[in-house]
Structures are given as C-alpha cells and as structure tokens.
Amino acid sequence: MDELFIKVQGLIKAGDVLISEHGYDELIEDNLSVRELLDGVINGAVVERYTDYPKGPCLLLLQQDKFGNPVHVVWGIPKESGKPVVLVTAYRPDPKRWDENFLRRRKK
C-alpha cells in the first residue's frame, strides 16, 4: 500500500487534522461535511501523488460522500513537521474531465 496514504490515514485516525480555509469553503460549496470525508478516507483510492509539492507531499484521493457519490479530496502533510494532515480541498469531480471511475483525467 502507498506509504503516504498510510500516513494520511494514521494522522486522521489519531485526530491530528487541520482543515484549510479553502477546504472549508469547498466543503460548503459542494455540501460536504468534514466528518464524512474523515470517515471515508479509509476506503479512499489514490488518484494522484504530489510528492514534490513545496509545502509538503499531497495526495488526491477518490472518496465517497455519505450517499456514495464520488468526491476528490486533496490531503497534504507539512514538509517541516510531518503533521497534522491538512484537508487542502475537496470537490465533486466533473465527469467530463474524468474517466468513468474518476481515477484518470480524460485526454483533451
């Protein structure tokens, strides 16, 4: 399993989580709750890895909302401290931009 994904899950399980201001804005915009995303990370699937992101490594995960609909969530871990895990953003993926499983971007 993906080492960064395991670290994200562990920090969430430990309650060591921060929601970014942008993350809160996106949750409200898409009618998502923090709780459903925290609970759903256990069943998430890694879509993309951003290991060289300047602020620290990030993952784009495919998760589900409480109704089973797809949600993309970016989780990041600060480079210097290694914690907390940060919910950077979350959004409902556009089916026109993603394959039928929401795991790969469609070619333009």
Image (spheres, helix red, strand yellow):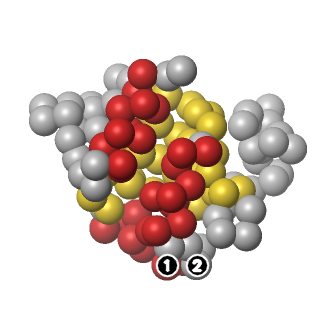
Q: Nearer the viewer, residue 23 or 40?
A: 40
Q: CA distance from mark 1 to mark 2?
A: 5 Å
Q: Nearer the viewer, residue 21 or 107?
A: 21
Secondary structure of the residue carrying tag 1 is helix
Q: Left or right of 40: which side holds 99?
A: right
Q: Nearer the viewer, residue 29 or 101?
A: 101
**Marks 1 & 2, CB-CB < 8 Å contact:** yes
Disc 2: which residue: 31
The x, y position of residue 11, in whole percent, is 31, 43
Q: Is residue 49 above or below residue 15?
A: above
Residue in the image at 73% along x and 70% along y: 67
Picture quarter with the C terminus: top right
Residue in the image at 81% along x and 53% along y: 95
Q: Amino acid at mark 2?
A: Asn
Q: Left or right of 79: which side holds 37?
A: right
Picture quarter with the N terminus: top right
Q: Left or right of 14: which side holds 101?
A: right
Disc 1: which residue: 28
Label 1: how many Cα within 10 Å (few below 14, some 14–19, many 20+): few
